[in-house]
Amino acid sequence: MLDAIVVGGGISGAVAAGRLRTAGRSVVLLEARDRLGGRTCTVDLLGHAVDVGGQWIGPTQKRAHALARRLGIATYEQHHRGAKVVRLGAHTATYRGLLPRTAWNGGTVDDPRIGPRQLLSLGRALAHIELAALRLPVGDPWDARHAAKHDALSVEEWLTRHVGDPVARRVLAWGVNAVFACEPRDLSFLYLLHYARSAGGFQPLLEIRGGAQQTKLHGGTQQYAKRLGEGLDVRLDWPVRAIVQDERGVTVRGERGELRAGRVVLAVPPPLAHAIDFAVPLPAGRAAMHAKMPMGSALKWIVAYRTPFWRERGLSGEAVGDGRFVRAAFDACAPDGSFHALVGFVFGDDLAGLKARDEAGRRAAIVEDLASFFGPEARDAIGYVDRDWTSETWSAGCYVGVAPPGLLTEVGAALRAPAGRVHFAGTETATRWTGYFDGAIEAGERAATEVLGG
Ligand SMILES: Cc1cc2nc3c(=O)[nH]c(=O)nc-3n(C[C@H](O)[C@H](O)[C@H](O)COP(=O)(O)OP(=O)(O)OC[C@H]3O[C@@H](n4cnc5c(N)ncnc54)[C@H](O)[C@@H]3O)c2cc1C
């Protein structure tokens, strides 16, 4: 019998398995896909490694930085010099700083602009969110004084009640799209506050400098799990279908066979955990999380160009707003000037309009959208790659599990508490940087520590 089985070969599971192995335990890492990395995936585009999954790390993500250093993965800074582009309705404008604007004076209902009134409204809403997040206990949002009240509201309902200006609401919805890859109606306001608290504020979630989008890994982020997997007993193409625990151990079953261990670490996204049959039912809170926490929806694209034409026009490559499909874009050039690209996302409801198209159709739609942000040169693309994470069987969406109203207070402490011999990792269970690599590492370390102590 093994000491432990880790289910899920993303960063969290690979960290947990690595810790257990280093502590001298016998451990097998089971992964459903034919590769390690989960929501990190690095592919080739014109001879360059690009991330179609998670990509950035931030300065306060100490674990993500430390792990990159330990694995010998060099980092570089996300390009951010120059003006950002915002597109609201038919208006495209450039801006600097956190908040976009399209006019010095506000527009009308028929001709919306982001002017002083909208900026004031946005500033107030952001301050409100920052203050409310600060009042949350880190990692245990359900214990907050107003937890029930905040969890009863979707972010959309909160925006309607607290942000009077409709254009300001629209801009905040872009922020929610970009940070959570879902629509404001699908997200509990308490979950948004919890996320912000876990990241040290809402602003670090949005920003490049000082925020979650500051730094990238040379060679891509899939190296985290790949390098952690070296020296481990990894079984790929091994989807786990059932977990049966008794007083002496745990049996893990799949089409590939059956393994037995003293403990199991489950490091898979909530909807995938829901698909596993637990012969001994899980505590109600944990089962509720598996059943009711869907993933967000995003397609990530990277478009390559012969030249960084946006930089030549004083633009940073960062864009936000009302594209037909594109809500957010960033510069994705190689730091040595050998590769020029833009990267970005299609989120939530907008993704439905791309699903029926083949790759050429998606490329044409994204490139046309980019032309509306960056000008006609954007049509001269020389390479394209994308990944629709909602079509990935073993992710069921991305970036992360999204808690709808009511779920967080229902799940409570069961989010992380072991269920007998089964321990829970995965970024969704993290207390710091929930939803990010950093959180995945924290959760993997915590689950391994539980196993070692048990
Ligand atoms: C497009 C995109 C952009 C993102 N951007 C960023 C970013 O810039 N920065 C950042 O920090 N984070 C980002 N994220 C989120 C980040 O990728 C995740 O937080 C992190 O990778 C999650 O790691 P994990 O190990 O918890 O889960 P996962 O990576 O999902 O790993 C779970 C693993 O379990 C496997 N699995 C599932 N079911 C089973 C089963 N039944 N049996 C066996 N194996 C199973 C899966 O195949 C997968 O490999 C992004 C994610 C995506 C997709």
Image: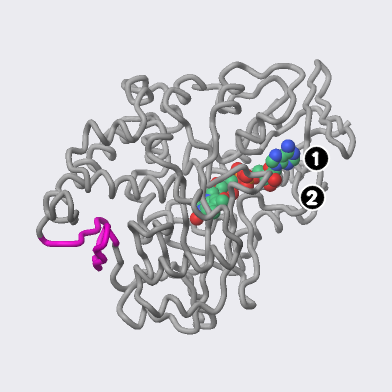
Confirm whether residue 203 shows in the render.
yes
Q: Quadrant of the C terminus?
A: top right
- Left or right? Give the position of 2 relative to 167: right
Q: Nearer the viewer, residue 443 or 317?
A: 317
Q: Is mark 2 within 8 Å of ligand 1?
A: no
Q: Residue visible at 45% across and 30% down?
A: 404
**Residue 390 location (% of width, % of height):** 59, 47
Q: Residue visible at 56% across and 70% down?
A: 384
Task: Say whether residue 317 is magenta.
Answer: no
Disc 1 marks which residue?
27
**Dots 2, 1 in contact, CB < 8 A:** yes
Q: Nearer the viewer, residue 65 or 57?
A: 57
Dot 2: within a 10 Å radius of its alpha carbon, few (fewer than 14), some, or many (20 or more) residues?
some
Q: Earlier in the sequence, mark 2 or mark 1?
A: 1
Residue range of the region highlighted in magenta in the rendering: 87-104
Q: Residue 259: name its quadrant.
A: top right
Q: CA distance from mark 2 to mark 1?
A: 8 Å
Query: Relative to 86, is 138 above or below?
Result: above
**Residue 341 location (% of width, % of height):** 49, 74
Q: Is mark 1 within 8 Å of ligand 1?
A: no
Disc 2 marks which residue?
232
- Left or right? Give the position of 270 relative to 354: right
Q: Residue visible at 83% across and 19% down?
A: 248
Type of amino acid under label 2: Leu
Task: Say whether residue 94 is magenta.
Answer: yes
Q: Residue 327: name its quadrant.
A: bottom left
Query: Relative to 24, is 191 above or below?
Result: above
Q: Main secondary structure of the magenta part?
A: loop
